[in-house]
Image (cartoon, rainbow, N blue to C red):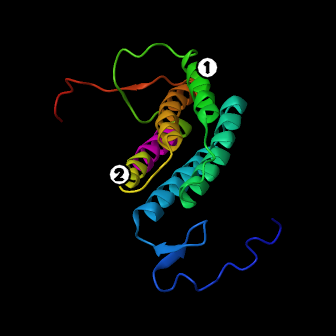
Amino acid sequence: MGNRLSKIVTRTGDAGTTGLGDGSRVAKDCLRIDAIGEIDELNSSIGVLLASELPPAIRDALLGVQHDLFDLGGEVCIPGHHIISEAHIVRLEELVTRFNGELTPLKEFILPGGTMAAALAHLARTVCRRAERRVVHLSNHEPVAEFVLKYLNRLSDLLFVLGRTLNVAGGRGDVLWAHQRSAP
């Protein structure tokens, strides 16, 4: 793998196409490339979150997620290839249970915000939801493995819980939505 990306400028995409992992070429605006781009943006948004000061357990969980997302993007890039498995889903569910178990139960809706790290976790959650919608759209036209969709769905749950956890770690509570807030 040492020289895989030794040539960055290839000029092969100048005509508006790009290569998939199986060697085929597709338009850069096709559904599969759109979904891959959203997954890449999600991974990048988690990278921004990781640039924050984070508790070690959260940092470790997010680094694992980044590796998973790279694999997930690779799976979407190679039609018919499967990398994400039930074990990935179970791991996310265990993380959600673990971090959520340390939080007080929600009685109100919350707003994305609080500490900078919590706000970034919520932003990553919204990017995850968008990536999930793009992959669902792709799956309506081409085959996509069920675990890809499940992974993105569970990941958005984890990012929500991590946003709450990061507020607690930062000495802040949830930012509660005020239902009957009077107009300014």
Q: Is residue 36 above or below residue 154?
A: below
Magenta: predominant secondary structure element?
Answer: helix
Q: Whole-percent x and y of residue 104?
A: 49, 13
Q: Which residues are magenta?
A: 120-131
CA–CA distance in space, label 2 to label 1? 34 Å
Name the residue carrying label 1.
98
Judged from this view, the residue extending furthest toward the left is: 183
Of residue 179 and residue 124, the one placed in the foreground of this image is: 124
One can see residue 169 in this view: no
Percent from the top left, x then y, of residue 147? 53, 39
Farthest right residue in view: 2
Residue that carries the numbered disc 2 in the rendered image:
140
Q: Nearer the viewer, mark 2 or mark 1?
A: 2
Q: Is residue 85 above or below residue 81?
A: above
Q: Is residue 38 above or below residue 108?
A: below
Q: x%, y% of residue 14?
A: 51, 85
Splitting the image into 4 quarters, where does residue 96 fall? top right
